[in-house]
Amino acid sequence: MLREKLLLVPNNPGCYLMHDKTGEVIYVGKAKNLKNRLSSYFNGTHTGKTAKLVSEIVDFEYVITNTEVECLVLEINLIKKYNPKYNIMLKDDKSYPYIELSNDKVPRLSVVRNVNRKKRSSCIFGPYPNVSAARNVVNLLNRIYPLKKCSNYGKDVCLYYHIHECLGYCKYNVPQEKIDEMKNNIIKFLKGDSKEVVEKLTDSMNQASEALNFERAIEYKEMLEFIDVILNRQRINLNDGIDRDIFGVYSDSVYLSIQVFFLRGGSLVERRVSVIPIIEDEVNTLESFITNFYDKDNLKPKEIFAPNYINHGLLMEHLGVKVLTPLKGEKKKLFDLACSNAKMSLEKEKELILKDEARTEGANGELERLLNLKINRIEIFDNSNLFGSFSVSGMVVFLNGRPLKSEYRKYKVSVDKNDDFNTMKEVIYRRYFRLLINNEKMPDLIIVDGGKNQMNACFSVLNSLNLNIPVLGLKKNDKHQTDTLIYLGREIPIDKTSDLFHLLTRMQTEVHEYTINYHRTIRSKGNISSVLSNIEGIGEVRKKELIKRFGSIKRMKEQSIDELSSILPINTARKLYEYLQNMDMKDEPN
């Protein structure tokens, strides 16, 4: 049937969608010539991910486009729509964090994402593939330069003013020239010129040392060491002030390793490596990767360096960025360095990648064979309560053996007692009734982290909704360790040395920690609410405002009466302040 269908495929450019036996789209690709590309899947031999893909294809469809650019855009949109499991490299990469210096009269420094969607004008620096590095830079600059720290002005100066990290803009009239000077120095630093910052820190360190304040001097020394680490990354410099991204590539025909160098102002600020499986060919895989890279709200540079075998014109037309392959000089050396790094990364990480695939996709396949099911999406549930109070449930999703955190869900349960059966019934109903109403995709398997009682609760709800979703139970032994699976009335022992056991253990840990963390949040808010109920004049609306602003009793206790009076009447703020100061620390909720 497939070979007969291939005879009708035209030689036009377009996108194609591969379906498995359930009708699900498992891969989306693009081609200059649809007939040649589709025929290649069913002729000759394949290896790696391509071989696995071909073994699951039972049907295909295609969409003809007028141009290759239309084809590229359509591929991205189809992948977003169907989320196919074999389009791994187009699903895993996230948008990078950037540092934003706001354009307010008194600017604020912060770490942001989704920078392409920002409507207000501001200075954006980055990207920073490591979000911790971005936060460290922001914290460093906030300590050196006393900019505004609060999102809103208070009625009086706060703690930042007293520790010399704010000039008290809410109370004092700070000259605009002083603010602009700080802003300019910060911009210089974020563009790679650290001279002003280093001099300022060095002077402060020497002054602290002369004053015998050695603890403060050590803090300044550590800041200087952190800057030195940053500068070490920036010693690669083309000295032309141009922002560019360099995509160095190495392939072993099964995997494609891509090393991205981020140059800002001509200096190397960060780098990121991705190792992805090759499904179509190296050219299409790299073109799709680069296109998707800038579809994730990553800022486009002025130039992109990439191998000469990809379609530069196609990427330039779609991205609106100059794409080229350097052929000589320092630019060629830097591009070759990125490619060398890509090669080293593949050689170093390939064994780890294969082990990871065994623990995830391999273990998922082991579960498929054990249960005789086709499993792509698994949803697993767990309940938590404290002596019947603050009952909550959590659900995590694993897609082909990997956690899909964007799909996690948490539920505050109305069954406010220690009743796992009815808690499970409520959560299962809420989850799958909503999916039915919205016509959303159902899971291939539901796992309940409990025995037959919770499974029966799950079955009763699914039957009432006329849903036929397989349910797997995890049974624990006397030592509270999972050693048996319950499926279709059978108890199946599980090998504790297997990859499947480790995958199920990871699922249990993931859903348990996710649920427990939500339970702690709810319990903490409940404890805060009970404390606030002791204060006359604090009703539900003011409770919510206090919890939203401070988050914990400990934080509230640290506030002055003036700070509390920004939410409460002054007399009520005074009562709360006195009550909190007289509380025993050990009795305070988190």
Image: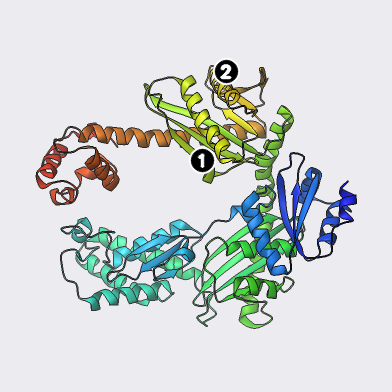
User: Tag on residue 119?
Assistant: none
The residue labelled by disc 1 is: 408
Residue type of the residue flagged with mark 1: Tyr
Query: Along the line of sight, which residue is nearer the eye, 408 or 436?
Result: 436
Disc assigned to residue 452: 2
Query: Can you give x and y, in whole percent of width and height, for residue 503 in the image?
Result: 61, 35
Q: Which image quarter is the C terminus in?
A: top left
Report whether residue 45 is seen. Answer: no
Near-viewer residue (302 or 251): 302
Q: Is residue 381 above or below residue 355?
A: above
Q: Residue at x 55, y 76 (%)?
A: 302
Q: As shown in the figure, which amino acid type bears the numbered disc 2?
A: Lys
Q: For residue 339, which quarter of the picture?
A: bottom right
Q: Quadrant of residue 450?
A: top right
Vertical relation: 239 (above or below) 442: below
* Res. 169 visible in picture: yes
Q: Earlier in the sequence, mark 2 or mark 1?
A: 1
Q: Determine whether 278 is above or below 237 in the image.
A: above
Please tell me how many numbered marks the rendered image carries. 2
CA–CA distance in space, label 2 to label 1: 24 Å
Q: Position of residue 73 (x, y in %)?
A: 65, 63
